[in-house]
Image: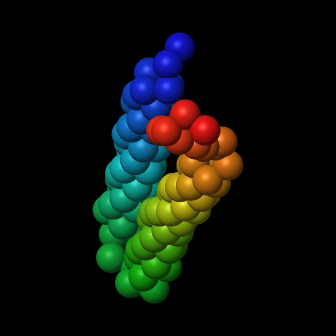
Amino acid sequence: MSLDETRAKDVALEKDRARYGLLAVVISNLAIAGVAIFGVWRLDGDKSVIVGVLTAAFTAVSSMTTAYLGIKAVSNTARSMAQDRAAREQPTTVPPQAGGH
């Protein structure tokens, strides 16, 4: 397997991870919002409990989203650092000098 094929597979894998990770976060956030809306609807106007439910839902959604973005940023940084290090550590070949010495 060539280096270009390996990089292409790595890029495809990273795109899949990002896509499905984001999908999981969006679905989770929609589920939290749905439960919160259902809870508010069933409370029939009890303001103090509604505020608590909405606050908890907002906290859960923001925590989930922040965790995903934080993990994604750290993952991207680590991958970038590993690629830079691998590029620096590759042996370089010195072309032979012309002139027949």
Residue 33 in the image: state x and y as whole percent: 37, 58
Number of marks in picture: 0
- Foreground residue among 73 and 48: 73
When the figure is inspected, residue 17 is found, relative to residue 70, above or below; the finding is above
Residue 73 in the image: state x and y as whole percent: 51, 62
Extreme residue toward the bottom, this view? 48
- Foreground residue among 41 and 22: 22
- Foreground residue among 27 and 48: 27
31 lies left or right of 1: left
Residue 20 in the image: state x and y as whole percent: 42, 37
When the figure is inspected, residue 28 is found, relative to residue 56, above or below; the finding is above
- Foreground residue among 90 and 95: 95
* Residue 96 appears in view: no
When the figure is inspected, residue 32 is found, relative to residue 54, above or below; the finding is above
Q: Quadrant of residue 50?
A: bottom left
41 lies left or right of 36: left
When the figure is inspected, residue 52 is found, relative to residue 74, above or below; the finding is below
* Residue 97 appears in view: yes
Residue at x 61%, y 53% (from the top left corner): 88
Residue 95 in the image: state x and y as whole percent: 53, 39
Residue at x 67%, y 49% (from the top left corner): 89
Instruction: Identify the colour scheme used.
Output: rainbow
Extreme residue toward the top, this view? 1
Residue at x 46%, y 31% (from the top left corner): 7
Q: Quadrant of the C terminus?
A: top right
